[in-house]
Image (cartoon, grey):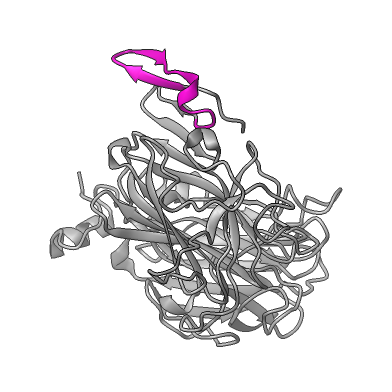
């Protein structure tokens, strides 16, 4: 998106234009209640107009970004350093950085976190609190090493950390996040997850590293480029703490690579169960060429781990997820990938707090599946390999407090072949029980202490 060459601001109920010289490449659309702003690191926004010029101390965007900071073990942060230009302006291929940076998406400049050696990179964007800016998306290109991992940590207007996003999954056909098919840096758009959208922030700390299972291991280089950071001003959202996600990561309490999941109780899940004629083991896996299951399985949708229902032979796979009833969790979405046979089918059965079945969702198709075979290709990519597909619960179930979920993957034909599958990033929201429901009666007996949402 090319940025307009003037600000369009609101005064009272009308809009007026500010001189175009003020902001050649920052767009404000504040004729309503929100302002869309794109930071593209151009000279017209207040950034230096020279290859290799340092951004910290010289990259403020009036009314938007107060300042930039660099950190992390991959940067030289010595206070006596004079050539403080390892977070710098670059002009793309052949520029003053590493020489192979990607072309700018907008204008002629990008930001390059060059660094001095191995270890993670951190870039802090301090926002003007008066603008009440939230982050929508940003573009990341990796110049580090294998298994690139980008992160963003979000701080509210009080300066408190409210949460983070972690991105690892590359685009289809590429070897890593922020890379093209030939391993060269290539911008990949990263979008903020739902619970942080529209929440005004005081700062965002962007990170880049080589993913390592051990968080104490700094890993190899995390050099990266940034471009087109999209912010929204006059944000009025509140951090929604009712979201609960099950992503099978070690910091949630799950085990390491290859560890068994069935029979365990972790966080909001009181018990994982596994059955079905084809089921063998429900285990932690790390995806493409880095797992212990199938080499071609897709990478996790977020973080490093996902759950793989590995098989013992032909037949359906059935995974049961028993939930803590007191949390009133309602399923919103999840990611599913299939390593079974075509055509495939996934059935999700929902059980209310009365432990009775409330109905099912059936998923069979993938619009991005193999050409001519999108019907029956749920969880399968265009080249017939497993590919994580974003699936959502039907509207009638999105406000239903659950006691458990049953996921059934099967080969949808008379042959009853294998139905191995992976599942990740299972997202729930806290539901408000309907008046007169069992859940509300129980709550009435124990009081309202601990409810995440106020009953009205």
- Identify the image quadrant of the C terminus: top left
Q: Quadrant of residue 266?
A: bottom left
Left or right, residue 267 beside residue 141: left
Left or right, residue 279 beside residue 214: right
Q: Residue at x 55, y 38 (%)?
A: 42
Q: Tell me: residue 98, above or below residue 59.
A: below
Q: Quadrant of residue 448?
A: bottom left
Q: Tell me: residue 19, above or below residue 378.
A: above
The furthest residue to the right: 372
Magenta-drawn segment:
7-26
- Identify the image quadrant of the N terminus: top right
Residue 138: image location, x then y, percent: 54, 48
Residue 93: image location, x then y, percent: 73, 51
Which is more toward the observer, 304 or 17? 17
Residue 410: image location, x then y, percent: 70, 68
Evaluate whether residue 277 shows in this view. no
Q: Residue at x 61, y 43 (%)?
A: 109
Evaluate whether residue 332 shows in this view. yes
Q: Residue at x 66, y 64 (%)?
A: 143
Residue 74: image location, x then y, percent: 52, 72
Left or right, residue 243 beside residue 120: left
Q: Tell me: residue 23, above or below residue 97.
A: above
- The reply to whether the magenta stretch includes residue 406 is no
Q: Quadrant of residue 223?
A: bottom right
- The reply to whether the magenta stretch includes residue 18 is yes
Q: Residue at x 65, y 39 (%)?
A: 108
What is the count of numbered marks? 0
């Amino acid at each position: 998106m090319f940025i307009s060459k003037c600000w369009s601001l609101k005064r009272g109920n009308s809009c007026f234009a500010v001189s175009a010289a003020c902001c050649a490449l920052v767009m404000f659309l504040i004729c309503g209640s929100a302002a869309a702003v794109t930071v593209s690191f151009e000279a017209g926004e207040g950034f230096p107009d020279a290859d290799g010029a340092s951004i910290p101390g010289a990259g403020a965007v009036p009314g938007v970004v107060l300042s930039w900071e660099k950190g992390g073990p991959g940067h030289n942060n010595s206070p006596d350093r004079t050539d403080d230009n390892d977070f710098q302006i670059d002009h793309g291929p052949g520029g003053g950085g590493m020489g192979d940076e990607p072309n700018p998406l907008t204008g002629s400049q990008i930001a390059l976190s060059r660094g001095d050696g191995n270890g993670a990179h951190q870039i802090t964007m301090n926002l003007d609190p008066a603008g009440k800016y939230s982050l929508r998306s940003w573009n990341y290109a990796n110049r580090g090493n294998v298994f690139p991992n980008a992160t963003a940590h979000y701080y509210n207007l009080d300066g408190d950390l409210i949460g983070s996003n972690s991105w690892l999954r590359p685009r289809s056909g590429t070897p890593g996040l922020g890379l093209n098919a030939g391993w060269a840096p290539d911008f990949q758009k990263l979008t903020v997850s739902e619970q942080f959208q529209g929440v005004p922030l005081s700062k965002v700390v962007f990170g880049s590293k080589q993913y390592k299972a051990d968080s104490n291991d700094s890993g190899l280089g995390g050099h990266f480029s940034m471009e087109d950071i999209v912010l929204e001003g006059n944000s009025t959202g509140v951090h929604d703490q009712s979201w609960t996600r099950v992503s099978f990561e070690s910091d949630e309490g799950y085990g390491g690579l290859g560890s068994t999941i069935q029979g365990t109780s972790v966080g909001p899940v009181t018990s994982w169960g596994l059955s079905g004629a084809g089921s063998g083991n429900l285990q932690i896996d790390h995806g493409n060429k880095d797992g212990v299951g199938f080499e071609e399985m897709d990478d996790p949708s977020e973080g490093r781990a996902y759950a793989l229902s590995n098989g013992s032979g032909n037949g359906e796979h059935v995974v049961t997820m028993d939930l803590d009833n007191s949390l009133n969790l309602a399923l919103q979405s999840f990611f599913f990938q299939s390593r079974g046979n075509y055509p495939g089918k996934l059935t999700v059965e929902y059980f209310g707090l009365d432990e009775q079945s409330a109905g099912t969702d059936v998923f069979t198709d993938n619009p991005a599946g193999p050409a001519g075979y999108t019907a029956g290709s749920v969880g399968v990519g265009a080249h017939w390999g497993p590919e994580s597909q974003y699936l959502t619960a039907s509207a009638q179930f999105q406000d239903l407090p659950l006691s458990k979920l049953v996921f059934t993957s099967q080969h949808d034909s008379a042959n009853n072949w294998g139905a191995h599958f992976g599942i990740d990033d299972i997202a729930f929201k806290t539901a408000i029980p309907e008046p007169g429901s069992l859940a509300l009666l129980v709550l009435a007996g124990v009081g309202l202490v601990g409810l995440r949402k106020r009953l009205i």
